[in-house]
Amino acid sequence: MGKSIHLKQLELGVCYYPEHWKEELWEDDFKRMRELKMSTIRVGEFAWALFEPEEGVFEFGLFDRALDAAHRHGLKVIMGTPTATPPAWLTHKYPEVLNAAQDGTIYRHGMRRHYNYNSPKYRELCAIITREMAEHFKDHPAIVGWQLDNEFNCETSVFHAEADHAAFRRWAQRKYATLEALNEAWGTVVWSQTYTDWEQVYLPRPTVADSPNPHLALDGKRFISDSVLEFAQIQADILREVAPQHEVTTNGMFGHLDSHALTDQLLDYFSYDSYPQFSTIFPSADEKPLLDRKWSLNLSAVRDVSPNFCIMEQQAGPGGWVNRIDMPSPRPGQMRLWTYQSVLHGADRVMYFRWRTATVGTEIYWHGLNDYHNRPNRRVREAAQVGREFAAVGAKIAGSTYQAKVAILRDYDNEWDGEFDVWHGPLTARSTNAWYKQLQYRHIPADMVYLRRESGEELERLSRYELLVYPHAAILTEQTAELLTAYVEGGGKLIFGARTGYKDERGHCRMQPFPGPAAQLCGITVEDFTLIKGTVQAPALRWTKNGESRETFAEDFNDILNVEDPAVEVMAEYAEDYYAGRPALTKRRQGRGEAWYYGAAFSEPVVDTILDLLNIQAPTADWLTVSEQVEIGIRANGQGSYVFLLNYGADAASIVLSEPRNDLLSGTKIEGAGEIPAYGVLILE
Ligand code: GLA
């Protein structure tokens, strides 16, 4: 189990920037926050130029006054370390702290996150400002915790400064010890890429056709993740030493960063920034997209890091930057709905971003609760409703956790390798989407589980699930295969998709039949395979067990399977092309469980058919009928079980309850046929 935030009550709060406003606004702002029943603010994370206007000169007066005022109003404070925004004096004097593009072009002052993690000078300066702040604020009665930096790896998750190349060289030396081992791991025998001196080793630099060595590219991402951890550790250590009574967290889940390791190693709990509208503004070919509801998938990944977490930034209006990102205004009710989306998935503290829209800078269109005019508006009224509701029901829900019997598995190695490798990466996005969507539409709650520790504890964690789907584990270690075999033997059902197990952890293709270490468990091998692309059509499937009449096709990639074990049942075969009649979907019993192998990427109709075959029901199937547009999820603890119904539709959704239930939010009893209003929320006890 990951580390969680521990609160007795759901808490509401908001991000506040005292440095953006005239001081005479503060008192009124804090007073109104309390009227909205907010308890916590986050401040300070970008204010380095104020805290240290010149090197070694520290000024905390503005924040002292702001914190005192917040405290007078009974607000708690999370203080950010400001290291995402090095001041102009700093980068001017020490340009080696700046990050660079792959071609070496230095990123200059003018935005944020323009630093690199490996510059010794930057680490030193960050340690100094962190210690100064910790010493100065440690006894302030308003402060409860710290946010490290802001959104590690947001805006960019690749680093090419000289300091990064040098640190990568040392990292590679620690990992491989000899150049011989490094050359072997990176397969440098191909195209005379052999390194004969450590000084020749770099993170991926510009190459012809933008195609760096793939094994090096994967290691480069592991290195970036390790760099973030090292960088963050320095700040966490200082805060633990100077202010041991305070919590330490950080916000955001971004690429090339093992957020699980980060949390286990140095945080008290994980925090996330939730902007569900990002999943609605890009065009999609999907016929029935999940839209903002798809954000629940991200929140499920966050929950795998910390079962109860903090939302450091919850969308409080339309988001926008001056030159990119432009979002429509949330409809009345949507902000509240998204707040409960976060709560359903495990958030116990939710802080809106931000109190008031900035009147200057890149984010003048990233709307806060209050607008420029600072007069009452519908977003403030909506937040007030949430505040009242949290106050009324928050003690019951805090500390309860999301309940799921199905999990989709993923892991960092495949995520990072798959960004680069077009022969498996795109399959994972496709299949994860199809599974998540069909589970959502069938009201079957699902977790996202990252496979990490190959230990007994991991087996215990997996064994809580009836069904695991590991869509395309191209990289699969022997230990993971053993772990999954033990899961199946203990009674679990496991489903793999195409391309499983053909790579080892270095990204080398194995000289053995696919699915490599999973072949025995599945009882099949892959003799031949093809991408489905261009003029090649996806072949239809013929289902052997359930007379499936829906049109289903084996999309994107086809593994043509050989049955190797008499215990294997062929559930579907390819109905077309040169491999017509060959197995496409197989099932093998082992111990008390089942291992399934599907030779293609999962499409929605295929997932549906498999779910029918597995006969997995929604946990509320006995007493609740509800339309597809509603997300259902359950949070439970020793005291009770809370069924959240979230209507993402612009129309009312019908529900039928065959047993009476109490709706916590309205305090009314519901039975028989009813409706959830557009963007409405019910929490049934
Ligand atoms: C991120 C950042 C915030 C703000 C918002 C909106 O989540 O952490 O500082 O920029 O996005 O863009």
Image: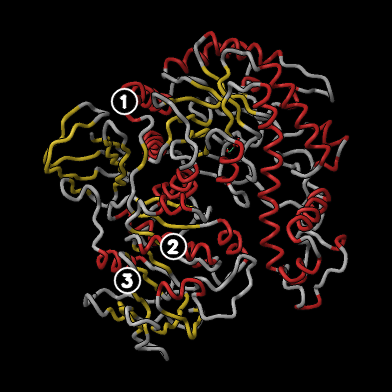
Q: Earlier in the sequence, mark 3 or mark 2?
A: 2
Q: Secondary structure at mark 3?
A: strand
Q: Locate the C terminus and report the quarter of the image it occupies.
A: top left
Label 2 and label 1: CA atoms lie apart by 40 Å
- Numbered disc 1: secondary structure: helix
Q: Which residue is mark 3?
A: 589
Picture quadrant where residue 579 is located: bottom left
- Disc 2: which residue: 484
Above or below for 167 versus 480: above
Q: Residue 393, which numbered label?
A: 1
Q: Residue at x 28, y 64 (%)?
A: 611
Q: Amino acid at mark 1?
A: Val
The mark nearer the N terminus, 2 or 1, is 1
Residue 168 occupies which quadrant of the picture?
Answer: bottom right
Q: Position of residue 156 (x, y in %)?
A: 67, 49
Q: Find residue 316 and report its horizontal and vertical position in percent.
A: 47, 33
Q: From this view, report whether residue 34 is shown above or below residue 647.
A: above
Q: Name the secondary structure under disc 2.
A: helix
Horizontal arrangement in the rendering, residue 557 relative to residue 88 (left or right): left
